[in-house]
Image (tube, rainbow, N blue to C red):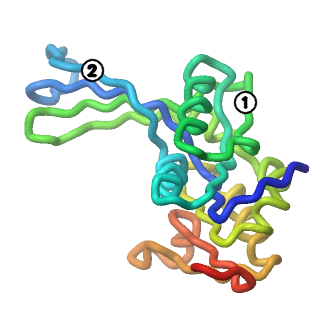
Amino acid sequence: MCSISAQIVTVGSCMRDMTSFTGRLPKAGETVQGRRFQMGFGGKGANQCVAAAKLGASTALVAKLGDDSHGRSYVDELRAHGVSVGHVSFTGDSHTGIASILVDDDGRNCIVVMSGANALLSPGDVSKAGETIARCSVLVCQGEIPAETNLAALSLAKRHGGRLRPCSPRLDPIISHLTVAVFFFSSQNGF
């Protein structure tokens, strides 16, 4: 078990975004010409972690990537933003998560998500990050990973004095803590 010092720990997803821009979205069975293509780094978990790092917090990400070129470039991108990647693991059992995104001239989009390695992030991965989670000030979870993995992270945080602050009260109360949740640790200062 590896312990990393971080104010904010995110247990969540990494997605490689592949975005095609076109004049209009295709109808079923239709092919349209694209105007521009870009690849980016997304996933709600990674986005939350990088945003906190950009605001000056020390951050760590607990995530799973495919053992492929997308996964390796993703780790480099996280490091470039100052995110601790000691709890980001690779798997040969699936690809890095991919989001295929179509965007038309009016900004409307269609997205196909292939969860890939995100679906393999497990309670065991959370357990390996247990000391890091226990020592953080804020734990962030979201719904692009298995529910049992979120529950393991939230349970671990609660055992160490965390208080739940759901960020999406409009969602069904039974699952709101699985979609976006933040745990504040009462023993820490600053949050």
**SS of the residue under disc 1:** strand
Please report the residue visible at 18 percent of the width from the left and 15 percent of the height from the top: 31
**Residue 144 % position (x, y):** 54, 49
From what the image shows, is residue 44 above or below residue 81? below
16 over 35 or under it: above or below: below
Residue 62 on image: x %, y %: 69, 49
Q: Residue at x 49, y 55 (%)?
A: 48
Q: Percent position (x, y) of residue 102?
A: 25, 30
**On the image, which quarter does residue 103 sit in?**
top left
Residue at left offset 15%, top offset 16%: 32
Residue on which disc 1 sits: 90
Q: Could you give the CA–CA distance between mark 1 and mark 2, rounded to whole angstroms?
A: 27 Å
* Residue type for callout 2: Phe
Mark 1 surroundings within 10 Å by alpha-carbon count, few (fewer than 14), some (14 through 19), many (20 or more): some
Q: Quarter-wise, where is residue 66 in the image?
A: top right
Dot 2 falls on a residue whose secondary structure is strand
User: Of the residues under marks 1 and 2, which one precedes in the sequence?
Assistant: 2
Q: Label 2, on which residue?
A: 37
User: Is 60 placed left or right of 57 in the picture?
Assistant: right
The answer to which image quadrant residue 127 occupies is bottom right
